[in-house]
Image (cartoon, coloured by chain):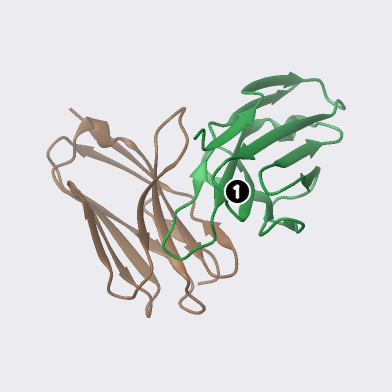
Amino acid sequence: NAGVTQTPKFQVLKTGQSMTLQCAQDMNHNSMYWYRQDPGMGLRLIYYSASEGTTDKGEVPNGYNVSRLNKREFSLRLESAAPSQTSVYFCASWPRHRGNEQFFGPGTRLTVL
Amino acid sequence: ILNVEQSPQSLHVQEGDSTNFTCSFPSSNFYALHWYRWETAKSPEALFVMTLNGDEKKKGRISATLNTKEGYSYLYIKGSQPEDSATYLCAFIDNDMRFGAGTRLTVKP
């Protein structure tokens, strides 16, 4: 039982390059989330998927797209990376039951030059 | 309160001190409140899941209370230790999940 996994762990991009961050969970959770961590701002929600087949914008969606490929997988795509997207990205999943917590992946550290 | 607010933003205490910090959230449409502990270079890990007004949860030296009618939760740490140094996040859940910016705690030996 791996929990929430993310790939890659580190990535360096040049401005304008594209890439996809992968996230998978093996806990059969309904909801999945992408956050970015910025100094002094905690976690900010980029996009989420409440259930398989649905995606919604969070607080900071500009410059990103997502795909909920199936119940297990939720990917985040940067079409044209910008230096402002330098951050640590966390994927998380939640069973969407009242008494359960969110589980986080290990994070992807992205630098855009 | 429309957003989730945490105070203070940062806190420095001496080893052995007891401390507490606050999470304020909208008082309508409450579903659950989570507290997470987030160490540098790691992922956030859940401390408490709170669902009922008046809930009190405890894990070792850390405890939390919840008041959904007035929209706040307190996290208490008794006898702080250097290993308690971390950022403590709260997350308010109604239809969405919204995190506060966190309280960064530093415990000096």
At x 22%, y 39%, the residue is B13
Q: Is residue A58 above or below residue B1?
A: above
Quadrant where the C terminus of chain A sits is top right
Q: Secondary structure at mark 1?
A: strand
What amino acid type is highlighted by mark number 1?
Arg
Position of residue A106 measured from the top left corner of the image (x, y, whole percent): 53, 31
In-front residue for pair A1/A51: A1
Please state the total of marks drawn on the protein image. Answer: 1
User: Where, by quadrant of the figure, is residue A12 drawn?
Assistant: top right
Q: In this figure, which residue is indicated by the disc labeled 1?
A: A44
In-front residue for pair A67/A15: A67
Q: Which chain is brown?
A: B
Q: Is residue B28 above or below residue A42?
A: below
Colour for chain A in the figure:
green
In the figure, is residue B22 to the left or right of A46? left
In the figure, is residue B52 to the left or right of B97? left
At x 80%, y 36%, the residue is A78
At x 27%, y 74%, the residue is B54
Circle 1 packing at 10 Å, graded few (<14), some (14-19), many (20+), is many
Position of residue A26 measured from the top left corner of the image (x, y, whole percent): 57, 41
In-front residue for pair B10/A61: A61
In the figure, is residue A106 to the left or right of B68? right
Q: Chain of mark 1?
A: A
Position of residue A66 measured from the top left corner of the image (x, y, whole percent): 78, 45
Q: Is residue A77 above or below residue A32?
A: above
At x 37%, y 78%, the residue is B70
In the figure, is residue B35 to the left or right of A69? left
